[in-house]
Amino acid sequence: MHKFIAMVGTNSDESTNRKLLQYMQVHYADQAEIELMEIKGLPIFNKPENRQIPEQAQGMAAKIDAADGVIISTPEYDHSAPAVLLNALEWLSFHIQPFVDKPVMILGASYGALGTSRAQAHLRQVLDSPELRARIMPSSEFMLGHSLQAFDDDGDLVDDQQVAKLDGLFADFQMFVEITKKLKNANATTYQEVRDMDWEKL
Ligand SMILES: Cc1cc2nc3c(=O)[nH]c(=O)nc-3n(C[C@H](O)[C@H](O)[C@H](O)COP(=O)(O)O)c2cc1C
């Protein structure tokens, strides 16, 4: 059974993105082990001279390292991924490489009609940067618009079409994880490139 880390893309205590990940944790419990990971509490990234990474970020990196893949659920603020999520990714790419070649599934929930389409496109670009180099599942988007109305009192998604779509995408992600394991010819050089990457020496 695959083990996934599900990153909650916000520091809000009340979050429909967290609800979406909790729904997946329960709904797919017989298919995968999904552990939620919070980004709340991380300091604002400030490029410390001693390269000391906060303990919380080190713990997060260790969990991502050990997982078969990462699921990120992002809200959308001002047509972008939230600053707190980008902040977490900055820490998780500062002289550590947990995302290199890691399969990632991007999801999003927002109050607007478009349900994070722009935030997801933005996040995809960030995860593809030279320090992160994640393996993002291609040609897939799960966007939960009007997310305040999307769940019933038990935390289940109310729209059957959304459930069917998420079921399909999650099954595809499980296959994507297996396919990605085979795409390993460049793995060693990619890691080396990311390790050697130093903006101060460009
Ligand atoms: C400053 C601000 C900007 C926002 N911009 C957007 C937006 O561009 N698109 C959108 O769909 N929702 C937008 N929203 C609504 C968010 O989707 C909503 O507040 C929430 O963050 C949804 O995620 P959550 O339930 O996980 O917190 C915005 C909210 C705030 C406070």
Image (spheres, rainbow, N blue to C red):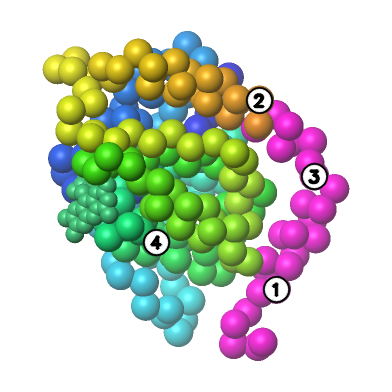
Quadrant of residue 145 within the rendered picture: top left
Badge 2 or badge 4: first in the primary sequence = 4
| Image quadrant where one finds the C terminus | bottom right
Tell me the amino acid under the disc marked 1: Asp
Q: Are marks 3 and 4 in contact (CB under 8 Å)?
A: no
Residue at x-position 32% and y-position 30%: 20
Tell me the amino acid under the disc marked 4: Leu
Q: CA distance from mark 1 to mark 2?
A: 31 Å
Whether residue 92 is visible, yes or no, is yes
Residue 26 spot, x, y in % from top left: 35, 18
Instruction: Give the residue number, with chain letter if any, for mark 2.
Output: 175
Whether residue 5 is visible, yes or no, is no
Q: Residues within 10 Å of mark 2 (few under 14, many from 20)?
A: few
Q: Nearer the viewer, mark 2 or mark 3?
A: 2
Q: Are marks 3 and 1 in contact (CB under 8 Å)?
A: no
Q: Main secondary structure of the magenta part?
A: helix
Mark number, residue 196: 1
Q: Are marks 1 and 2 in contact (CB under 8 Å)?
A: no
Question: Element type at marker 1?
Answer: helix
> Which of 161 and 3 lies nearest the eye of the viewer?
161
Residue at x-position 53% and y-position 20%: 168
- Residue closest to the far front: 113
Q: Residues within 10 Å of mark 3 (few under 14, many from 20)?
A: few
Tell me the amino acid under the disc marked 3: Lys
Q: CA distance from mark 3 to mark 4?
A: 27 Å
Mark number, residue 147: none
Span highlighted in magenta in the image: 177-202
Question: Element type at marker 3?
Answer: loop
Instruction: Give the residue number, with chain letter if any, for mark 4.
Output: 86
